[in-house]
Image: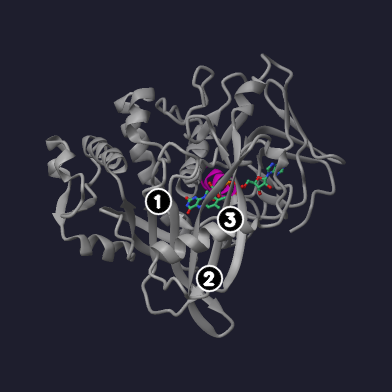
Amino acid sequence: MVSLNTDLDTDIAVVGAGIAGVSTAFFLLKYTNQRVVILEQRKLAHGATGHNAGQVVAQFERPLTDLVAEFGFNMTKNALHDLQSGWILLDEMYTDGNLDILFSRTPRRRGFSDLYQILLALKDMEIEKMAGLPLNEFLISDTAPFLSSLPKVFEKFYKIVPHAMVLEKLETKEKNFHAVVTDQAACMNSALFCQEIVAYLFKKYPERFALYEDTHIIKTVLKKNHVLLDAGKHTIHAHKVVLCTNGFEGFEIFNEDGLEIDKRFHHLITGKVGYMSGYLEDMNKPPTAINYYTSDADPLSDDPYYYLTRRPHELGDKKHNLVCAGGPELEIRDREEYLHDYDYPERMQGDIDAFIKRVYSVDADQKIEYEFTWHGLMGYTRNRVRLIGAEPKNPVLLYNLGCNGIGIIPSIYGGRRIARILAGERLERSIFDPQVDVKR
Ligand SMILES: Cc1cc2nc3c(=O)[nH]c(=O)nc-3n(C[C@H](O)[C@H](O)[C@H](O)COP(=O)(O)OP(=O)(O)OC[C@H]3O[C@@H](n4cnc5c(N)ncnc54)[C@H](O)[C@@H]3O)c2cc1C
């Protein structure tokens, strides 16, 4: 791939080559006849897309009761179905691209250790049922100290089982876990996925698609029917621009043909750095995805749970399981404070190692050789809902961004939604719409 070495004219400029930018380009090329250029300040899939846990789940990183309170039941219900449609869209991308990279379907377990966490999960389940989604398996241990405090109204949602069954499903010896919910998930390498999809797009649409790396967009100037992007030495002229930047990194927006785009609104996207470590195990267990809500975790805090994926990994001739665990996060005041290549703090490594030994089924005295440690930047919108759609003050600007912790499926859904908007479809209002009055 090359960096931009000339001025450029295109129909749609997509800024950011992570899973959001690549999916947006995929659906725009497939469902419109527009020319699409992706502009990436670093390398393809080297942002959050290259630094995640690879858990594919269709879920919000926020209790559904909160979403219902903010947007009402109907809009929340539609959004739940929208996210579920991400599975079919992902399948469409795999099929069209004829991809044979690993995609391990696996049940995902969420393990809970206190009453508050369980009540939140039960309320979520009630809303999912009202929205017409299938019920997930919800098991509560017969020794849970809070059994008598569970409201009767939720009885139909869970089954009481021996404590050992809960622990077995969670692959833990930590006796504090008293409930487990199982839903549908998968594990994938989202960076490899992006590389393969981009290779497919180059082949399928040689006349209409381009991607430039090492091309930092510094400024975008919005006019009435078009947009100018400043890439330093060169300028890109486009009819529309879609920001798939995770948040807004090193970016200025000038709306020359209308009201000022509210800077405060954009600055409401805050940055969080997520830390992860991975090590190799023998390949004697199936792939899995598990989230552990430990008893010391405050669900309202910044790092409410640890998460773990186990998936096959090839190193040389040998096949292993790669176990990746994460959980510790740090909020940063200014997203530009984040340096992609800064050191991995020992404290975070210590936290993850202690979690694995305490919770995951590893002996406490076993020395684990961590093959990989890494961190990645997540852009959080204030209300933890991804921002997908046209800027109300000038629709030449569109967004598919706001990582919010769980971003693989939402990014793909966002790509399809952007393509529908730019194909001229009139879509129903959605909780993903950028709205001036919503506090994101
Ligand atoms: C540690 C960690 C674990 C995670 N685990 C999971 C998980 O298990 N499951 C899940 O669903 N999600 C997970 N996520 C979230 C998920 O990775 C992200 O939501 C998703 O990858 C976001 O994709 P994106 O394309 O929006 O952003 P990114 O992949 O960050 O891509 C944005 C791109 O925009 C580029 N860019 C920014 N500004 C400019 C500019 N001015 N000019 C040009 N280019 C620019 C960046 O360089 C970057 O490449 C995790 C994230 C982290 C950090």
For marks 1 and 3, the one nearer the N-term is: 1
Range shown magenta? 21-31
Q: Which residue is mark 1?
A: 57
For marks 3 and 2, the one nearer the N-term is: 2
Q: Amino acid at mark 3?
A: Met
The residue at 14%/53% (across/down) is: 160
Q: In the rendered view, does 242 fall on the left or right side of 184?
A: right
Q: Is residue 361 visible?
A: yes
Mark 1 vs mark 2, CA separation in Å? 22 Å
Q: Which residue is mark 3?
A: 348
Element class at badge 3: helix
Q: Position of residue 228 (x, y in %)?
A: 76, 31
Q: Which residue is mark 2?
A: 279
Mark 3 vs mark 2, CA separation in Å? 15 Å
Residue 43 inside the magenta-drawn segment: no
For mark 3, does the 10 Å Cα neighbourhood hold few (<14), some (14 to 19), or many (20 or more) residues? many
Q: Position of residue 182 (x, y in %)?
A: 28, 55
